[in-house]
Image (cartoon, coloured by chain):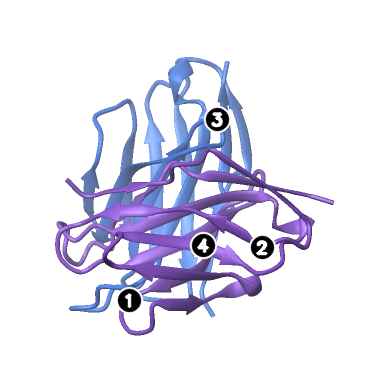
Chain colours: A purple, B blue
Amino acid sequence: AQSVAQPEDQVNVAEGNPLTVKCTYSVSGNPYLFWYVQYPNRGLQFLLKYITGDNLVKGSYGFEAEFNKSQTSFHLKKPSALVSDSALYFCAVRDNGSSNTGKLIFGQGTTLQVKP
Amino acid sequence: SQTIHQWPATLVQPVGSPLSLECTVEGTSNPNLYWYRQAAGRGLQLLFYSVGIGQISSEVPQNLSASRPQDRQFILSSKKLLLSDSGFYLCAWSEFVAGAVNNEQFFGPGTRLTVL
C-alpha cells in the first residue's frame, strides 16, 4: 500500500538555526513528492515538489527538500529558521494507483515551532 | 492566474440540519476537484474527488455527498448533519493534463463547520 510517514508530531527549533522536517514514503512506481504548509485556520499552501532530476529541490520562502531514493525520504529543510515559519507542514505523494485523478496521499503533519 | 473560493468561511449548524458548502475555481478549465476534511488541525481526509462534470468519486462512506453541476463548481452537502461532521473542510483543485503525473493541488481557504 502507498503511504507517507511524518515521524515527528512536533519539531522545535531556535530562530536562526537550521530546521529539518522528516518525511518517508512508500509508493509503487516513480515517486512524485510534495510539501505543503498550513497556517492556523487557513488552507494549505504549496511549497515545493520533486518530480525527477536534481535530488535537491528549492521552493518558496527559502525552503528546500532533499530526495533520497535509497532511504525513500523527502525531508524538508531550511538553513535559517524564522519565527514566522511556525506552522503545520504536510508531506504528500502522488497516488500512482489512480492515474489522471491527481490524488495525493498526505502524511499526518508535523508542527514546526520556531522560538525567538 | 487561478483562484479558488470557498464559502462560507465559518458555519454553526444544529444537529439534523442540512448542509451546503460551495467551492468555485477561476482561471482554469476542466480541473480535478477535491473535498477534504481536517479534524483537530491535523491530518487530511479525502472525502470526494471529481475529474469532470457530474463525475464524483467517494473515498469514504459517510453522511455527506458531493456534486459538480458546472465545470468549476464543487458542492459538498448533507441532508442531516451529525456531531461528527464538525471540522475544517477544504476544497482543492489540480490541473488536468492528459498523461501528466506531477500536478500539485491548490487549496481554498477552508470552511470551519461546527455542529451543535
Q: Secondary structure at mark 1?
A: loop
Is label 1 or label 2 in front?
A: 2
Q: Label 4 sits on what residue type? A: Leu
**Mark 1–mark 3 CB contact (< 8 Å):** no
Cβ atoms under marks 4 and 1 closer than 8 Å: no
Q: Which mark is residue B9?
A: none
Q: Is residue A42 left or right of residue A6?
A: right
Measure how far apart labels 4 and 1 are at the Cα level.
15 Å
Residue B20: give x, y in percent of width and height. 46, 38
Q: Is residue B67 above or below residue A97?
A: above
* Above or below, comparing residue B86 to residue A39 in the picture: above
Marks 1/2 in contact by CB < 8 Å: the verdict is no
What residue is disc 2 on? A18
As measured in the structure, the alpha-carbon distance from the residue carrying label 2 to the one carrying label 3 is 28 Å
Q: Which mark is residue A51?
A: 1
At 44% from the left and 70% from the top, the residue drawn is A66
Q: Are marks 4 and 3 on the same chain?
A: no
| Residue B43 x, y percent position in the rendering | 45, 39
Residue to which mark 3 is pinned: B40
Looking at the image, which residue sits at the far bottom? Answer: A53
Mark 4 or mark 1, earlier in chain: 1
Amino acid found under the numbered disc labelled 3 = Ala
Q: Residue at x 26, y 64 (%)?
A: A70
Residue drawn at the location 24% of the way across and 77% of the way down: B100
Which secondary structure lies at badge 3? loop
Can you tell which of label 2 and label 3 is closer to the viewer?
Answer: 2
Write the residue at 36% across / 59% down.
A73
Neighbor class of circle 1 (other Cα within 10 Å; few <14, some 14-19, many 20+) is some
Q: Which mark is residue A76?
A: 4
Q: Are marks 1 and 3 on the same chain?
A: no
The amino acid at mark 2 is Pro
| Horizontal arrangement in the rendering, residue A71 relative to residue A19 (left or right) | left
